[in-house]
């Protein structure tokens, strides 16, 4: 059974939603994961923010704008009056729920209920549309099987246990529709897999049902060799290994949610990145194998903070790095990059929630320097021991840009450099022209 995920633009208009059947074959047993209609989650974020800050008037105004958009949407989606009426009931229900939240004590718990409405709307409307055109389908409630634990980590075994009986209830049905992004947390509350999380849903369902293939349908023909929003002339990459794809997704390639590769990697389920606007294009295939002797792609991640701890106590000492890392562990702050010298260590983080506490504790070890507004530029490809000259080419490409950190050799498939965010665009363009043109 395949899992097909369609992103926000792929369901972004009634016309696009109708065109899904050019790709989805209703005769083949499969699970279709839908995102919210494009722009919806951004609006819901604003609505939640308005509620959280007590600005009910703003929330009402934003809700009215969004509801009007959905009224127009269903007017074009449905042809028959009875199905238009069903569509109207769907949007009245969800917008009624959103409006009623104004009467509640609004916390982050209610905020997540707000954020969940986008995927609930898109999937329910699509399900009604399929009924109108006479295509049998089953709407699977993601909140009945998508689960994260107290650390926000998905619980795949729970998903398997809960989705399998649901599927078994419909032995004769082929087409199953479900919501991306949303899940329940360890308290049973509505939660989500973070922005862009529908990719993660598809991969997790793929893992939970040991799917034969996961397809991520989006608005571009696969993973490109650089960020197409910044660099001109980028090209799709035909094949990536799970590790390479994970690295690119984590370091900024927006086409994939940062964690979405891991569940499919664990069960060796191939992932295809495909273009809804150009269904015949080959896209990108992500599998276990990696091509030798190639530089594949470049990505960049902003919002990075570098922390340098300088301490003569580090000299010839053991246990020093452990004590440094324990500080980050205490504050549940992941480290991305790390470089060391005999008397100093530099690390980068992107979550600065506890930066003050972390630097206070690190001050005990030595002097601490913090640099904000940094970006990690990551080049992915075959940097194995048997290849040579690639690292030099990467550094040569950025020789006119001040580089704060370089990480090489941690894995055989990537080299990362830390630059000021102000220099990132130049770094991406320069690397692109020297490595690919
Ligand atoms: P969806 O709504 O389908 O999930 P996203 O907007 O999340 O789509 O992801 C697709 C977008 O990712 C593309 O339109 C493109 O602008 C952006 N993107 C950033 N880096 C890359 C890359 N390396 N390759 C392909 N797309 C990328
Ligand atoms: N709708 C969610 C978002 O915009 C999830 C997704 O599209 O993947 O972040
Ligand atoms: Mg996305």
Image (cartoon, rainbow, N blue to C red):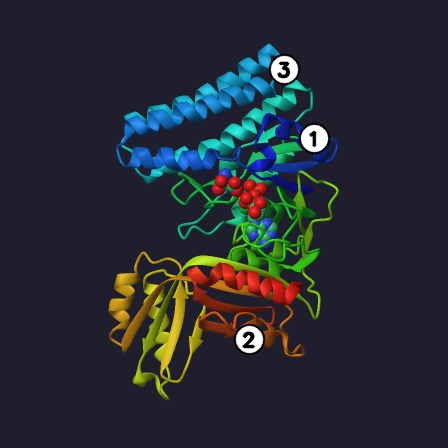
Per the rendering, the mark at residue 409 is 2
Q: Is residue 430 left or right of residue 268?
A: left
Whether 187 is drawn above or below 313: the answer is above
The numbered mark, 1 or 2, whose residue comes first in the sequence reads: 1
Label 2 to label 3: alpha-carbon separation: 59 Å
- Decide: is 220 above or below 374: above
> Given contact means CB atoms under 8 Å apart, are the residues at marks 2 and 3 in contact?
no
Label located before the other in sequence (2 or 3): 3
Between the C-alphas of marks 1 and 2, the distance is 46 Å
In primary-sequence order, the first of circles 1 and 3 is: 1
SS class of the residue under badge 2?
A: loop
Label 1 residue SS: helix
Q: Is residue 250 left or right of residue 342?
A: right
Look at mark 1 in the image and give the residue it sits on. 21
Residue 166: image quadrant is top right
Q: CA distance from mark 1 to mark 3?
A: 17 Å
Residue located beneath label 3 in the image = 79
Quadrant for residue 352, please give it: bottom left
Label 3 beta carbon less than 8 Å to ligand 1 = no
């Amino acid at each position: 059974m395949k899992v097909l995920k369609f992103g926000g633009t792929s369901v972004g208009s009634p016309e696009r939603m109708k065109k899904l059947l050019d790709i989805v074959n209703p005769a083949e047993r499969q699970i279709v994961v839908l995102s919210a209609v494009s722009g919806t989650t951004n609006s819901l974020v604003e609505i939640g923010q308005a509620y959280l800050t007590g600005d009910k008037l703003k929330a009402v105004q934003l809700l009215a704008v969004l509801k009007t958009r959905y009224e127009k949407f269903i007017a074009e989606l449905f042809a028959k009056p009875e199905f238009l009426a069903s569509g109207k009931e769907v949007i009245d229900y969800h917008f009624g729920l959103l409006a009623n939240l104004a009467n509640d004590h609004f916390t982050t718990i209610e905020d997540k209920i707000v954020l969940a409405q986008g995927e609930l709307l898109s999937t329910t409307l699509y399900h009604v549309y399929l009924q109108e055109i006479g295509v049998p389908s089953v709407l699977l409630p993601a909140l009945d099987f998508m689960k994260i634990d107290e650390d926000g980590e998905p619980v795949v075994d729970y998903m398997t246990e809960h989705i399998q009986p649901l599927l078994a209830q419909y032995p004769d049905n082929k087409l199953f529709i479900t919501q991306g992004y949303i899940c329940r947390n360890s308290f049973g509350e509505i939660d989500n897999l973070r922005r862009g999380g529908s990719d993660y849903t598809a991969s997790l369902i793929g893992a939970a049902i040991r799917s034969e293939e996961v397809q991520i349908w989006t608005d571009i023909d696969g993973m490109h060799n650089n960020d197409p929003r910044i660099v001109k002339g980028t090209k799709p990459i035909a094949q990536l290994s799970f590790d390479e794809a994970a690295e690119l997704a984590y370091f900024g390639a927006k086409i994939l949610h940062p964690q979405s590769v891991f569940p499919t990697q664990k069960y060796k389920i191939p992932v295809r990145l495909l273009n809804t606007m150009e269904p015949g294009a080959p896209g990108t295939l992500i599998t276990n194998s990696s091509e030798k002797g190639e530089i594949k792609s470049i990505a960049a991640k902003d919002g990075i903070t570098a922390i340098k701890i300088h301490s003569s106590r580090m000299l010839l000492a053991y246990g020093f790095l452990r004590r440094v890392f324990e500080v980050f562990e205490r504050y549940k702050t992941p480290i991305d990059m790390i470089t060391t010298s005999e008397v100093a260590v530099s690390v980068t983080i992107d979550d600065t929630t506890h930066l003050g506490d972390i630097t206070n504790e690190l001050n005990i070890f030595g002097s601490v320097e913090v640099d904000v507004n940094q970006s990690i530029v990551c080049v992915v490809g075959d940097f194995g021991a048997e290849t040579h000259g690639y690292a030099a080419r990467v550094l040569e490409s950025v020789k006119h840009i001040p580089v704060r950190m370089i990480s090489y050799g941690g894995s055989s498939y990537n080299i990362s450099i830390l630059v000021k965010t102000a220099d990132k665009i130049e770094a991406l363009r320069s690397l692109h022209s020297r490595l690919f043109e």
